[in-house]
Image (cartoon, grey):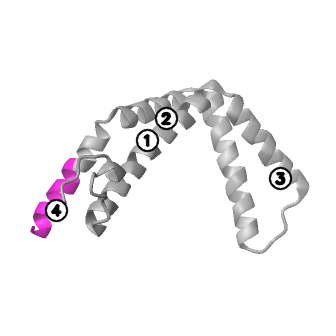
Amino acid sequence: MSTDKIIQIAMELGSAIALSEQARALQGAQTQVLDNPEAARLLQTYQEARSQMENKLRDGLQVVPAEEERLEGLRKQLAGHPLIQELMTAQEGFNNLTDSVFFVINQAVSGDCSADCSSCGGSCSH
């Protein structure tokens, strides 16, 4: 099979994923969070605090307990916000879809599909 044909099939797969229920749910949840000032601010604050802590750790600097407590407090606020919960659920669903697709591709490429194809979703042909 030619490289152009493989790229074409990959584009079709990407388009199918973009049209999936999981992708639509994720896009909708992202929009709801961004359209809600409280949820958007909370998410941004958490991401900034987490990034600062990761940078300190990467640079070999010590993270003080107050920073860990602040991040944990923000994490709890995120978990308690209904729009953020919807976003996390939608993200998990989308990740599960893409992980499954990646698994099936790996199975097909490596030829590790079992004889009954149950390990790769049952639709491969070997």
Left or right of residue 103: residue 122: left
Q: Is residue 89 above or below residue 99?
A: above
The kind of secondary structure element at disc 1 is: helix
Picture disc at residue 65: none
Question: Residue flagged by tag 2: what amino acid is it?
Answer: Ala
Callouts 2 and 1 close, C-beta under 8 Å: yes
Distance from the alpha carbon under mark 2 to that under mark 4: 29 Å
Question: Residue 94, labelled with which disc?
Answer: 1
Residue 69 as seen in the image, left or right of residue 4:
right
Amino acid type at image mark 1: Phe
- Residue indicated by mark 3: 68
Q: Which is more N-terminal, label 1 or label 3?
A: 3
Mark 4 vs mark 1, CA separation in Å: 23 Å
Q: Is the residue under label 4 in contact with that under label 2 (CB below 8 Å)?
A: no
Q: Position of residue 12 (x, y in %)?
A: 19, 48
- Three-letter amino acid code at disc 3? Glu
Q: Position of residue 107 (x, y in %)?
A: 32, 61
Q: Image quarter for residue 77?
A: top right
Q: Position of residue 73 (x, y in %)?
A: 80, 40
Which quarter of the figure is the N terminus placed in? bottom left
Marks 3/2: CA distance? 27 Å
In space, the residues marked 3 and 1 are separated at their CA atoms by 29 Å
Q: Residue at x 60, y 32 (%)?
A: 84
Please report the bounds of the magenta region as a residue range: 1-12
In the image, 31 versus 85, the foreground residue is 85
